[in-house]
Amino acid sequence: MSTPVKSHGFKPGKIEKNIINLMRKSNEPHGKPILIWNEICQTYGIEFSAYPKKDQPEELSKENKYKCGLTRLVKAQILKPSIIPHTSNNNSSMPNPRGHGYNYYSLTDFGRLVADKLYQEQQQKERSLRAKGDLERAMGQLREVGCAEVTIDQIQSVLWQLVGDSFESREEFYGFWSNVKIGVMLHDKVDRERVNRTDRRQKYHL
């Protein structure tokens, strides 16, 4: 099991993870400055009307949360702000942007490692959720055909019919849907017992 990503006691919360994921999507080539504030506003719906900000508490709250998230990520050395100069009418170089701090940020080398780890954790979480649903479907099909007791072999057989085409080979399938994995997923979900005195396999009561 992977451990949460930390830096000097810092653990990314939901807001920080949202920012890091947005940064990772645009981080090609690595380290390029990204106009992240625009991405944040567009992705998470931070949009002020013409009225004063103080009269729009929900939007103001979201904006402040993401401002603080950016600040925390910079302090944790996951992001670094980038000054993107532009030329004004008098040809002087000036920093961009406005009152909410920098518009542009880039992932540090350490930040890229954090972003990749968070991405892998998210992929693993999504796959685990899909696996849970696939197992529930398999158990449902076995109930529908009248099975009262099943072994893991029978469960694997139905799973192969349901999701086998998402694996490159049976070896990969059994590597993912191992006896141990199915046993752990069914633990405390259904009653079980040994097949008989000489057969140590478990049978599960549906």
Image (cartoon, grey):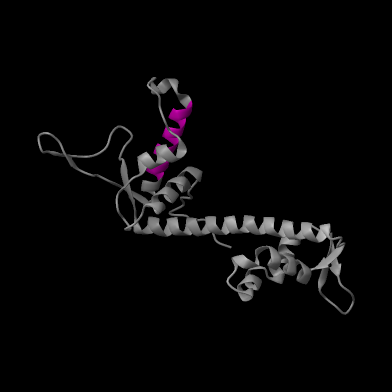
Measured as percent of width and height from the top left, residue 139 is found at 77, 59
- How many marks can you see? 0
Left or right: residue 190 compared with residue 9: right
Magenta-span inclusion, residue 81: no
In the image, which residues are magenta?
Answer: 58-72
Quadrant in the picture for the C terminus: bottom right
| Magenta segment main secondary structure | helix
Residue pictured at 81% horizontal, 74% vertical: 201
Measured as percent of width and height from the top left, residue 180 is found at 70, 69
The correct choice, above or below, for 133 with respect to 81 in the image is below
Residue pictured at 22% horizontal, 40% vertical: 95
Measured as percent of width and height from the top left, residue 132 is found at 68, 57
The correct choice, above or below, for 105 with respect to 139 in the image is above
Considering every residue shown, the one lying at the far left of the view is 90
Magenta-span inclusion, residue 63: yes
Quadrant in the picture for the N terminus: bottom right
The correct choice, above or below, for 159 with respect to 83 in the image is below
Residue pictured at 73% horizontal, 57% vertical: 137
Based on the displayed image, in which of its 4 quarters is residue 38 positioned? top left
Residue 188 seen in render: no
Residue 45 seen in render: yes
Residue pictured at 88% horizontal, 80% vertical: 198
Query: Between residues 70 and 177, which one lies in front from this camera angle?
Result: 177
